[in-house]
Amino acid sequence: MKKLDNKKGVAGLNIFLSVITMIFVIGILIMAFALTAAQMQDATDDATAIGIINDTSTAINSAVDWFPIFIVIAAIVVIVLLIVMLIVALRGGGLMGAGGA
């Protein structure tokens, strides 16, 4: 009968790094909404608020080229995944301790 190997804490690192990456991407989206909301607080009527929303979307569309942003985000995800693979390989090879007791 084959003995099962119970490694504690190995899956937690993958989840932790995935959560860090998701928080980074969500933070970028929230930043855009925060910039719009800061200007809308000064708006006195609905027409001004709608104008601010239109100005913000026009500025983002004209100032931002989305292809390089997708490349950077994809590169960050790839780097995080490579680091996770490296740490898992080092732990599996016995070159790095599992930590804890």
Image (tube, rainbow, N blue to C red):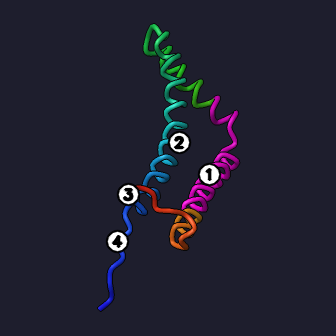
Instruction: Give residue 6's mark.
Output: 4
Going from N to C along the chain, the mark reached first, 4 or 2, is 4
Instruction: Give residue 24's mark.
Output: 2
Query: Label 3 is placed on what type of residue?
Result: Ala
- Name which quarter of the figure residue 59 lies in: top right
Circle 3: is it few (<14), some (14-19), or many (20+) Cα within 10 Å?
A: few
Query: Label 4 is placed on what type of residue?
Result: Asn
Q: Is residue 90 magenta?
A: no
Circle 4: is it few (<14), some (14-19), or many (20+) Cα within 10 Å?
A: few
Q: Nearer the viewer, residue 81 or 70?
A: 81
Tag 3 secondary structure: loop
Going from N to C along the chain, the mark reached first, 3 or 2, is 2
Point out the frontmost of discs 4 and 2.
4
Q: Is residue 65 magenta?
A: yes
Going from N to C along the chain, the mark reached first, 3 or 1, is 1
Residue 64 position in % (x across, y down): 68, 37
Instruction: Give residue 5's mark.
Output: none
Badges 3 and 1: C-beta atoms under 8 Å apart?
A: no
Point out the frontmost of discs 4 and 3.
3
Residue lying at the far front in this picture: please name it: 101
What separation in Å lies between label 3 and label 1 (alpha carbons)? 33 Å
Above or below, 92 against 51 in this view is below
Above or below, 81 against 38 in this view is below
In the displayed structure, does residue 74 sit left or right of residue 37? right
Q: Which residue is mark 3?
A: 101
Q: Nearer the viewer, residue 32 or 101?
A: 101
Question: Magenta segment range?
Answer: 59-84
Quadrant for the N terminus in the image: bottom left
Tag 4 secondary structure: loop
